[in-house]
Amino acid sequence: MKYLVSLLAGGLFGFGLALAQMTDPAKILDFLDFSGTWDPTLAFVLGGALLVTLLSFRFILRRSHPVLSPRFYVPTRRDIDPRLVGGAALFGIGWGLGGFCPGPGVAALGMGLWPPVVFVAGLIVGSLAFRSLQPRNPRHHIFGSSAQAGANRES
């Protein structure tokens, strides 16, 4: 059941991205081009997503747990470290160069064009490279200390 709901939610998300034209790299690149052909429509899409999130999370997080999971998985770290800044910079550079971020990139695979395929392949290779470079010590878990990592896995 959980996988079916995940598939339906992902399909709905992808449909929304396609409907808002966020799977079109030219639309994204125009949003990032302040001195040229700037297109503010992405700001409205982002603002709408932020509004829905702010309103719905107030009610959702009042529940003891999600409908199909024993607990909520929310970030516990609040610090800003070089890895976070570097990852954000790398994400932004990739977004600016390619016009895709992960969600729209995967959704754009359905268009049958090569740029999304190349992007998603790069995303997979980059993710595997990152994982292979991570220390094997559980204290350096990506989500923080080993106690936090254990809490994230066990609950």
Image (tube, rainbow, N blue to C red):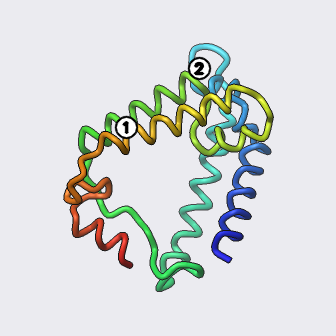
Q: Return the disc, 2 or 1, that comes first in the chain's sequence.
A: 2
Q: Position of residue 139 (x, y in %)?
A: 19, 59
Q: Which mark is residue 64?
A: none
Q: Quadrant of the C terminus?
A: bottom left
Q: Which mark is residue 87?
A: 1
Above or below residue 145? Residue 135 is above
In the image, farthest residue toward the top: 36
- Could you tell me which secondary element the residue under label 1 belongs to? helix
In the image, farthest residue toward the bottom: 64
In the image, 1 versus 14, the foreground residue is: 1
Q: Is residue 24 left or right of residue 63?
A: right
Mark 1: amino acid: Gly
Mark 2: amino acid: Asp
Q: Quadrant of the N terminus?
A: bottom right
At horizontal 72% and vertical 31% (from top left) the residue drawn is 24
Q: Position of residue 77 (x, y in %)?
A: 29, 59
Residue located beneath label 2 in the image? 33
In the image, 106 versus 66, the foreground residue is: 106
Bin the neighbour count of mark 2 within 10 Å (Cα to Cα): few under 14, some 14-19, many 20 and up: few
